[in-house]
Image (cartoon, grey):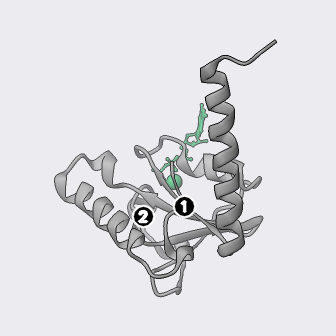
Amino acid sequence: MSLSNTEFQGAEDIERQQRRAQNVRKLTKRFRVLIIGRANAGKTTILQRVCNTTEQPKVFNRKGHKIDLSKLSPTAQRGEHDIENEMIFKSNTAFVFHDSHGFEAGRASELDKVKDFLQKCSTNKHLSDHLHVIW
Ligand SMILES: Nc1nc2c(ncn2[C@@H]2O[C@H](COP(=O)(O)OP(=O)(O)OP(=O)(O)O)[C@@H](O)[C@H]2O)c(=O)[nH]1
Ligand SMILES: [Mg+2]
């Protein structure tokens, strides 16, 4: 059975993406992933599943200082993540995640924060500081 044009195109795209991912892997220690979604949509759960864990991630601010989540107030804790913070799960340190709460707020200023972050990441000198995936 031969592949249709679209199926063939799809297989080629997947191969190309896999090659690209392998190249990024060679050049950088960690895949940098930005996850975007509404509050309570299941973002953290998805990331936990990707990293095969039920643990909470370790969170670091832009200066690399660890943030103690237990010291955050309950309201600040849920959904109020600074997009620049890096989240890393101990079970799989090959990924570093950024969590956007911008779009869910629906305010222009929140969207601008996301745009600024995207812009900043794309102009970083090191490939490791770029976003490799936006989910
Ligand atoms: N039924 C159902 N519940 C889910 C699913 N994924 C996550 N949940 C539940 O939904 C709630 C919110 O999940 P989280 O992963 O914390 O969502 P989040 O998007 O990270 O939330 P914030 O960080 O507060 O924005 C939790 O109680 C999860 O157990 C799913 O696929 N189905
Ligand atoms: Mg979350």
> What percent of the width, then of the height, locates residue 39?
41, 46
Q: Nearer the viewer, residue 45 or 14?
A: 14
Mark 2 or mark 1, whichever is nearer to me: 1
Q: Residue furthest right?
A: 1
Does residue 67 sit above or below 32 in this rendering? below
Secondary structure found at label 1: loop
Secondary structure found at label 2: loop
Query: Going from the N terminus, do you reach mark 2 or mark 1 first?
Result: 2
Q: Nearer the viewer, residue 30 or 56?
A: 30
Residue 94 visible, this orientation: no
Q: CA distance from mark 2 to mark 1?
A: 20 Å
As shown in the figure, which amino acid type bears the numbered disc 2?
A: His
As shown in the figure, which amino acid type bears the numbered disc 1?
A: His
Q: Is residue 96 left or right of residue 118?
A: right
Q: Which mark is residue 81?
A: 2
Instruction: Indicate the quadrant containing the N terminus: top left, top right, bottom left or bottom right.
Output: top right
Q: Is residue 111 left or right of residue 55?
A: left
> What percent of the width, then of the height, locates residue 105?
28, 49
Q: Nearer the viewer, residue 21 or 29?
A: 21
Q: Which mark is residue 132?
A: 1
Q: Nearer the viewer, residue 96 or 14?
A: 14
Mark 2 neighbour class, 10 Å CA radius: few under 14, some 14 to 19, many 20 or more: some
Does residue 73 sit above or below 124 in this rendering? above
Residue at the image point whose x is 66% and y is 37% from the top: 12
Tell me the quarter of the picture where residue 14 sits: top right
Residue at the image point whose x is 17% and y is 53% from the top: 108
Residue at the image point whose x is 62% and y is 47% from the top: 45
Ligand 1 quadrant in view: top right
Ligand 1 has an atom within 8 Å of the beta carbon of the residue at disc 2: yes
Tell me the quarter of the picture where residue 112 sits: bottom left
